[in-house]
Amino acid sequence: MFDPVINSLPAFAAYFATAVALLAIFFALYVFVTPYSELALIRQGNPAAAVSLGGAIIGYALPIAVSVAVSHNIGAMIGWGVVACLVQLLAYIVARFALPQINHAIPQGKVASGIFLAALSLGIGILNAGCIA
């Protein structure tokens, strides 16, 4: 009864560990690209930073989850993970240039800006996930 699950555990562990590693790399790159320290702002209780960063994490996790489901090997999954990472970072950079005041709004705790960035990340993540073949 549990044989299929037990037999699949090594593949599960490999895909899960790879997905977590990709998410950690995205997280590090995202906080590097932003001109403010989300973690410090979150520690200070800044809701805009928390919402924005949370949306970015979920927006990236969506295409990673789809890449796990459709990839037949970890190499393809990593490839889609790299594409998803670049798309998410590019979306943030475009938003930053289109709305330059957003760089100041997040540190000031303006929740509307955090919600906008979170919604952008989620929307791009959903589209990105849907395009993975």
Image: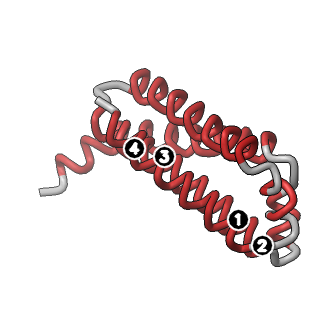
Q: CA distance from mark 3 to mark 1?
A: 16 Å
State the colouring used for the structure image.
secondary structure
User: Of 121 and 21, which appears nearest the observer?
Assistant: 121
* Residue under the image location 47 percent in, 23 percent down: 79
Rate crowding at label 4 as few (under 14), some (14 to 19) or many (20 or more) other CA atoms within 10 Å.
some
Query: What's the amino acid at mark 4?
Result: Leu
* Mark 3 or 2, nearer chain start: 2
Question: Are the residues tagged 1 and 2 within 8 Å (C-beta)?
Answer: yes
Numbered badge on residue 127: 4
Query: What's the amino acid at mark 3?
Result: Ile
Rate crowding at label 3 as few (under 14), some (14 to 19) or many (20 or more) other CA atoms within 10 Å.
many
Q: Position of residue 20 (x, y in %)?
A: 55, 45
Query: What's the amino acid at mark 2?
Result: Lys
Q: Is residue 110 above or below residue 65?
A: below
Query: What residue sits right under mark 1 in the picture?
Result: 113
Question: Are the residues tagged 3 and 2 within 8 Å (C-beta)?
Answer: no
